[in-house]
Amino acid sequence: MSQMTFSDYEYSLRKRKTKREEFLDIMNEIIPWEEWVEFVRPYYPNGKRGRPTKGIEKMLRMYLLQIWFNLSDEGVEDAIYDSYAFRKFMNIDFMEEQVPDATTLLKFRHLLEENHLGKCFSRRSIV
């Protein structure tokens, strides 16, 4: 998110952060995003055919929200639209892009499962 919106400004004036936002800020800091993206890249579609792909990091972030908060595909999509903390973690600016839909997340999750990548993330060191 490049420029602060009015809602970002209004939200920044709160007296405290929620526990959810604190958790997501910590996870954002300790996860080695570039390493994890490169780990998935060989299995991820290159976008030359079909619909344009979403970024790997964006899909990883959505996948992790789903796991951490025990949400369905549709539930995490709705939660990102509904929660400022989720939107901030996803780095989504609604003026520039939309949340990946539930079907896109489903396909990403299947890609991780088929290639046994989800298990690797739980074993990989976060710090």
Image: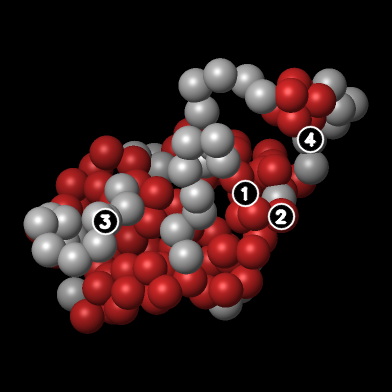
Residue 53 is labelled as 3
* Kind of residue at badge 1: Phe
Quadrant of the rendered image containing residue 68:
bottom right
| Of the two numbered discs 4 and 1 in the rendering, the one whose residue sits closer to the viewer | 1
Label 2–label 1 contact, CB within 8 A: yes
- Percent x, y of residue 103: 42, 74
* Kind of residue at badge 3: Thr
* Kind of residue at badge 2: Asp
Label 3–label 4 contact, CB within 8 A: no
| Of the two numbered discs 3 and 4 in the rendering, the one whose residue sits closer to the viewer | 3
Residue 86 is labelled as 1
Residue 109 in sight in this render: no
- Percent x, y of residue 96: 48, 36
* Kind of residue at badge 4: Lys
Position of 88 compared to 96: left or right?
right
Residue placed at 25% from the left, 48% from the top? 37
Task: Sort mark 4 into few (<14), some (14-19) or many (20+) by Cα contacts within 10 Å.
Answer: few
Label 3–label 2 contact, CB within 8 A: no
Label 4–label 1 contact, CB within 8 A: no
Position of 117 compared to 17: left or right?
left
Q: Give the residue pinned by disc 2.
A: 82
Q: Earlier in the sequence, mark 4 or mark 2?
A: 4
Alpha carbons under labels 3 and 4: distance apart:
33 Å
